[in-house]
């Protein structure tokens, strides 16, 4: 089924928005997001590996030809370093490792080089935004006192390690190792990492801590850096398990109805809200269970299972059976969005991602059932003639479509659904880690770094 869904999403993108970043499936035209500046083709690059894995050979070939002829980084464009890294660098790296086609390696390294000026700050903590022509960077104007964002500068590690590996140029890995050095020198309030860090002073901005937006994939990349290094990156391992310990103590709570959730921390006070983005953490806890210290393996799996259950409830308690952007545990509600501007669903993957990890790691059939419920809801409410669209209010009985087919729907949501219903030997976890945009990167095995098994 996910293959049919991918075909519908891809065919319509091709028909109405080919070469542009994303598709508007209702108005049947291209959608451009300023996250990518003038770089074009986000959906193509994000979808390459999904096409490959689903064996959509014709489509993969067309996509590859587009990359060869049209993917151009010599543009005057201000881009988000994080978004371009996870979608474009990550997408190209995976396409290279899966297919072995040199063009993807070349383009990934070329783009990586364009991103390097972002690190020209007093601390080496990169800017959020970079003009890839002039090399001038800056931060989001809304970010606490000129800060860079934890989930942005903390989500470069996996891709940059691979860029060094593939180019033979150590500079990429050096840049991301320095980020860790800066973080390890700083005092952490209660052992937690605030979402804001000033790249000039090297000091934290506001003390907001989140495992959802602004924080999320930083934690994910600590764990995955350790896994991707064939468990040799002891520093990443320690940072991950220490962080999880602090998260459990200060952020994880159980509602009176028995649902475990991860709250947000603002200068010592808890906001009892969990984002859809935060739902990825169920899969992360389960993936990290195996290496957990002090016999905590079972506990981390259980934590993953509880987060999966809570996130499933956030879907089940809506009329469309699709989860809201954020849900709360206060004012008498549990796992329900209370604010109008938190009721939307934009085809995000995190809940299905967690089902996929929980399925692979426990084989409890309920995760496939829950995934199937999501497929039915997507088909009923998000599928339109011209592709798939997000929904403005999942508690309403009538769809109000937002008219965007996000590129991560093809790279993540549909890929995780496909993997949820595939055998475990498709991209097995011993050999592959998924970047935060679901692009698989090979584990760099200790003895035989480039062996066939990586291919
Ligand atoms: C994706 O770009 C990535 O999963 C990122 O980590 C978070 N936001 C979207 C999906 O929701």
Image (cartoon, rainbow, N blue to C red):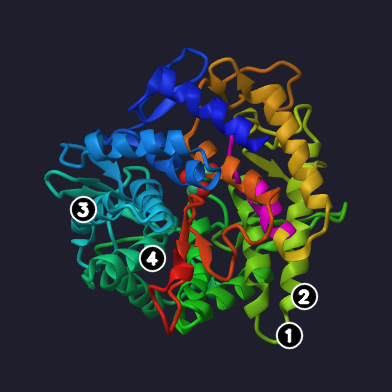
Query: What numbered label is drawn on residue 295?
Result: 1
Residue 351 lies within the magenta run: yes
Mark 4 and mark 2: Cα distance apart in space: 28 Å
| Left/right of residue 178 with respect to residue 303 in the rendered view | left
Going from the N terminus, do you reach mark 4 or mark 3 first?
3
Q: Nearer the viewer, mark 3 or mark 1?
A: 3
Circle 3 — which element? helix
Query: What is the quadrant of residue 333 in the picture?
Result: top right
Q: Earlier in the sequence, mark 4 or mark 1?
A: 4
Which residue is at 43% across, 43% downward?
48
The numbered disc on residue 60 is none
Residue at point 42%, 24% (across, down): 14
Which residue was labeled with disc 3? 110
Residue 185, compared with residue 407, is above or below; it is: below
> Which residue appears farthest toward the right when viewing the image?
257
Q: Is residue 59 above or below residue 423?
A: above
What residue appears at the point 57 percent right and 59 percent down from the top-left corner?
A: 427
Residue lying furthest top in this view?
27
The local secondary structure at tag 4 comes to helix
Mark 1–mark 2 CB contact (< 8 Å): yes
Is 301 situated above or below 33?
below
Q: Residues within 10 Å of mark 4 (few under 14, many from 20)?
A: many
**C-alpha span from label 3 to label 2:** 43 Å
Which residues, given as a range, are shown in magenta? 346-359
Q: According to the image, label 4 marks what residue?
A: 157
State which quadrant residue 444 falls in.
Answer: bottom left
Residue 326 is situated, as x and y percent measured from the top left of the image, at 64, 41
Quadrant including the C terminus: bottom left
Density class for disc 3 (Cα within 10 Å; few <14, some 14-19, many ≥20) is some
Question: Can the viewer see residue 42 in this picture?
Answer: no
Q: CA distance from mark 1 to mark 2?
A: 8 Å
Tell me the residue that label 2 is attached to.
Answer: 298
């Amino acid at each position: 089924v996910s293959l049919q869904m991918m075909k519908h999403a891809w065919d319509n993108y091709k028909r109405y928005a080919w070469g542009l970043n994303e598709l508007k499936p209702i108005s049947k035209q291209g959608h451009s997001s300023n996250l990518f500046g003038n770089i074009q083709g986000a959906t193509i690059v994000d979808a390459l590996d999904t096409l490959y894995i689903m064996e959509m050979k014709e489509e993969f070939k067309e996509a590859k030809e587009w990359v060869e002829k049209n993917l151009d980084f010599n543009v005057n464009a201000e881009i988000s370093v994080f978004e371009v890294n996870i979608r474009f660098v990550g997408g190209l790296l995976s396409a290279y490792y899966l297919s072995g086609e040199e063009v993807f390696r070349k383009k990934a390294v070329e783009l990586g080089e364009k991103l390097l000026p972002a690190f020209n700050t007093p601390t080496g903590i990169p800017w959020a935004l970079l003009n890839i022509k002039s090399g001038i960077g800056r931060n989001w104007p809304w970010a606490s006192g000129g800060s860079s964002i934890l989930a942005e500068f903390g989500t470069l590690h996996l891709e940059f390690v691979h860029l060094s590996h593939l180019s033979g140029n150590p500079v990429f890995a050096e840049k991301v190792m320095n980020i860790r050095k800066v973080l390890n020198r700083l005092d952490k309030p209660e052992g937690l990492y605030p979402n804001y860090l000033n790249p000039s002073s090297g000091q934290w901005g506001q003390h907001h801590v989140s495992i959802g937006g602004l924080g999320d994939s930083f934690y994910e990349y600590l764990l995955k850096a350790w896994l991707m290094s064939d468990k040799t990156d002891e520093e990443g391992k320690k940072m991950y398990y220490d962080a999880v310990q602090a998260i459990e103590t200060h952020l994880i709570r159980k509602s009176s109805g028995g649902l475990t959730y991860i709250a947000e921390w603002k200068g010592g006070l808890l906001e009892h809200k969990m984002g859809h983005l935060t739902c990825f953490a169920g899969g992360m806890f389960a993936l990290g269970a195996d290496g957990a210290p002090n016999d905590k393996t079972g506990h981390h799996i259980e934590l993953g299972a509880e987060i999966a259950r809570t996130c499933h409830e956030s879907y089940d308690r809506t009329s469309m059976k699709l989860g809201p952007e954020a849900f709360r545990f206060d004012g008498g509600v549990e796992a329900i969005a209370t604010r109008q501007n938190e009721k939307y669903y934009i085809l995000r993957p995190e809940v299905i991602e967690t089902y996929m990890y929980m399925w692979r790691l426990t084989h409890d059939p309920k995760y496939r059932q829950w995934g199937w419920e999501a497929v039915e809801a997507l088909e009923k409410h998000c599928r339109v003639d011209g592709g798939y669209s997000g929904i403005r209010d999942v508690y309403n009985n009538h769809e109000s479509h937002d008219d965007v087919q996000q590129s991560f729907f093809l790279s993540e949501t549909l890929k995780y659904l496909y993997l949820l219903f595939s055998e475990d030997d498709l991209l097995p976890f011993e050999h592959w880690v998924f970047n935060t945009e679901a692009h698989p990167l090979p584990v760099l095995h200790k003895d035989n770094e480039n062996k066939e098994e990586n291919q």
